[in-house]
Image (cartoon, rainbow, N blue to C red):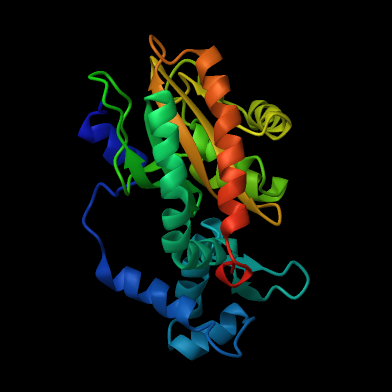
Amino acid sequence: MRRPAKGRAARRGEENGPYDLSTLSRAFDLLDAFRGENTELRASELAQHLALPKSTVFRYALALERRGYLARDPVSNRLRLGPAVRELAASAALQPDLRKLALPYARELLERFGETVNFGVPVNGWVEYVFVLESNHRVRMVPREGEREYMHCTALGKAILAYLPGRDVERIVQVRGLPALTAHTMRTLDALLRDLRGVRKRGFALDVEENEVGGLCVGAAILRDGVPLGALSISGPLTRFDLRRAKEAGVVARVFAKRVAEELQPSQVV
């Protein structure tokens, strides 16, 4: 079952209006200021470095801080690059290797369960589909490669969220919110955190009509030293891919995700 294009665009967080290229350039200039030895800077120092009014720098810095691209030291009030930058860097460095390692296991999952298999990575509070192996069934759940989804209501996303520090989960929820995509979507942080505890206990995440009515998905995180690098998932319609079958698939996905992590060389981890 393919989603309408309008829904996909909305979930990717695309802007309604045209891009302001000057605004983007200034934001990138601000981030570029932290290259080299400038690991921590005050807003006044940034204003001087960029030859911009202090009020403008404050405004840009606050927006980047809210998105996780900048972080503020509560004592010195200095700014530094935030966790979102590290996420992007790790994703860029690891994605080709993870894709190559995960693909044969994904193919085996497709052959064994006959449902669509997905591989995704975290990107700035979203989960992004790196590749999708489609089921041969006429009715099937099929996201698109490169598409981004909310993390709180997808098996891929929850598998990753379950192994992030609590403060990072809270930050993602603060920035992305908890949109109710169906009547089954979790609407509170407490409910999400309870679900994530279950994910850690089982070793795999379940999305039972939380992201799409009539759909069921199960996913397992690829962990290295406890850090979620990505996740594998299997998705299908509830009429065929029921909870019993999904839990069986989850156990296998958990084993395969662990094998992918074990095949990563230390030098491949940022």
The quarter of the picture where the N terminus appears is top left
User: Residue at the spot x=62%, y=80% of the render?
Assistant: 42
Q: Is residue 19 visible?
A: yes
Residue 44: % across, % down: 58, 83
In the rendered picture of this protein, how many numbered marks are placed on residues?
0
Q: Is residue 232 above or below residue 211?
A: below
Residue 76: % across, % down: 75, 76
Q: Is residue 228 visible?
A: no
State left or right for residue 26 relative to residue 195: left
**42 or 121: which is nearer to us?**
121
Which quarter of the figure has residue 132? top left
**191 or 61: which is nearer to us?**
191
User: Residue at the spot x=60%, y=53% of the render?
Assistant: 261
State left or right for residue 18 relative to residue 269: left
**57 or 92: which is nearer to us?**
92
Q: Is residue 191 above or below residue 219?
A: above
User: Residue at the spot x=62%, y=82% of the render?
Assistant: 41
